[in-house]
Image (cartoon, helix red, strand yellow):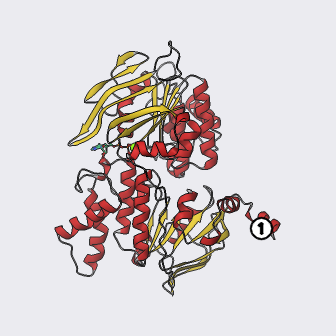
Amino acid sequence: MTSQSETDRPILSLQGIKKHFGGVKALDGVDLDLYPGEVVALIGENGAGKSTAVKIMTGIYRPDAGRIFVAGEEVEVHDTRDAWRHGITAVHQETVMFEDLSVAENIFMGHLERRAGGFLDWKGMRRRAAEILRELESDIDADAAMNTLSVAQKHMVEIARALSHDSRVMILDEPTAALSQAEIHELYGIIRRWQAQGKAILYISHKFDEIFAIADRWTCFRDGAWVGQGRIADVTEDDLVRLMVGRSVAQLFPKPEVTIGEAVLEISGLGNAREFDGISFTLHKGEVLGFYGLVGAGRTEVMEAIFGLKPIDRGEMRMNGKPMPHGSPREVIDQGIVYVPEDRQHAGVILPMSIRDNLTLPLTRALAKNGVFLNDRAEQAVGNRFRERLSIKCASLDQKVSELSGGNQQKVVIGKWLATHPGVIILDEPTKGIDVGSKSAVHAFIAELVRDGLSVIMVSSELPELMGMSDRIIVMHQGHTVRELARADFDAETIVAAATGLGRLQEKRHA
Ligand SMILES: Nc1ncnc2c1ncn2[C@@H]1O[C@H](COP(=O)(O)OP(=O)(O)OP(=O)(O)O)[C@@H](O)[C@H]1O
Ligand SMILES: [Mg+2]
């Protein structure tokens, strides 16, 4: 089967694991073997059961059936502490952080180090936290409060937390969703070190470049069932897609020809004290304007400022030809502009509410202002349309969003804002965590709305997506727009060079 020698046995092994939630079979008898010194990529569509398997290995959920073995011995994992005791640690897809506590406290939460006499060893803990962060080559301050960190930094702390345990099995459930390219490479380095130390690593990602860069073997789930495993060296990307989806998927980004209309949103000379300056661009009716840049280039900050979440010190904004004052998000929404943030857990959807309410509430409110109300049938119709077009996998529209898989939650976030029929939608990393099949569904739906006159600003770090979907791309570097390209001139090398600050030099050379 594999190259393991006879004496090698899995550190962690799942056999015939089943788990259901109400009528939903999340896992229907899956197997998984993790060997020392190996990276296994767990792949599967949104809702395939990957995170559920992780939660069973870490004692967050109990399986309905099946057995778990650690180093050949059958065990029961009742809770996170139990998992730690067995040497199993995970960085979960949805991180739970204590926002008011410090970075060091978050890293050691649940296993605070005690000195003789039972006193908490704060000093030792802070020192150890700083050490781990240094090991990650991160400049995050161990004393900083969690709520002062960016999404990417919070993710780093999560990884530091995993490192604070002495584990034999490290599980990473979409660890790179919020990381920059440099940080991803840093993470690869850490994973290689773990490998060298003989740890087993389970790596979950929808990004094929990562899977091929880091994994030795793959295991695939489809609809809660185990569909196969093998060596990465023996498969192509197309093979993996077929295994996940059950059919071939053309990974195309359908950009329909749309007649670009008049200027809708005009931004000129926008700047604030620290984050960006001299930002000017015009978004037209029916246009998709892409924003590319490395993490920290200021793209998100500009979008947050336009949406009223950040201060603006200079510059002007016009909407439909009229000056638009810098207002609160509420006022910006009233102008017909919505912003779908990167951080869905905090600003995207209301998790304890149903899918239906998340999709139709913003719309209901908008209509009610004009004295129009939706009846249940109309609401159901709206909900069903979005469910189908965005391929949201759920038992029913009445299901709580909190019960959906990560990727399906992200689809609800997008759907919720699209349902308000905005004039302008700003999407920040819209397909983060969305599987390859659903991605083209999401893109097709956006393209359809663009044909009906929607204008889109798309911030994305995925170049194929950006180049496929955009009419123009603006590249940002260190808080400035450094390059603008029309669709006919799109070229990956030029775009990446501009994003790293090399664009100007290159232009000179070509001139
Ligand atoms: N607490 C829960 N209550 C009800 N259903 C749940 C719950 N947790 C997960 N599910 C369901 O179990 C199935 C598997 O979800 P899971 O989160 O494991 O998927 P995943 O493979 O991690 O997907 P993604 O790639 O989107 O993260 C989904 O249909 C999901 O809706
Ligand atoms: Mg998941």
Query: Residue 52: image x %, image y %?
Result: 35, 38
- Give whichever of 237, 320 is nearer the camera: 237
Residue 313 in sight: yes
In the rendered image, the vertical position of residue 81 relative to residue 266, given as above or below: above
On screen, residue 372 above or below 203: below
Q: Residue at x 44, y 69 (%)?
A: 447
| Residue at 79% from the left image edge and 64% from the top image edge | 505
**For mark 1, what is the residue?**
507
Q: Secondary structure at mark 1?
A: helix
The x, y position of residue 496, in whole percent, is: 67, 58
- Identify which residue is drawn at 27% across, 77% down: 367
Query: Would residue 439 be found to the left or right of residue 397 on screen?
Result: right
Image quarter (top left, top right, bottom left or bottom right) of the C terminus: bottom right
Residue most toward the left? 376
Quarter of the rendered image showing ligand 2: top left
Type of amino acid at the residue the image marks with label 1: Glu
Q: Looking at the picture, does residue 103 appear above or below residue 67?
A: below
Crowding around mark 1 (Cα neighbors within 10 Å: few <14, some 14 to 19, many 20+) is few
Residue 327, how many percent across, how many down?
47, 75
Q: In the shown orientation, is residue 487 left or right of residue 7?
A: right
In the foreground, 134 or 436: 436
Observer-nearest of 163 and 74: 74
The location of residue 155, given as percent across then percent down, is 52, 44
Residue at image coords 50%, 13%: 6
Inspect this view and state whether residue 140 appears. no
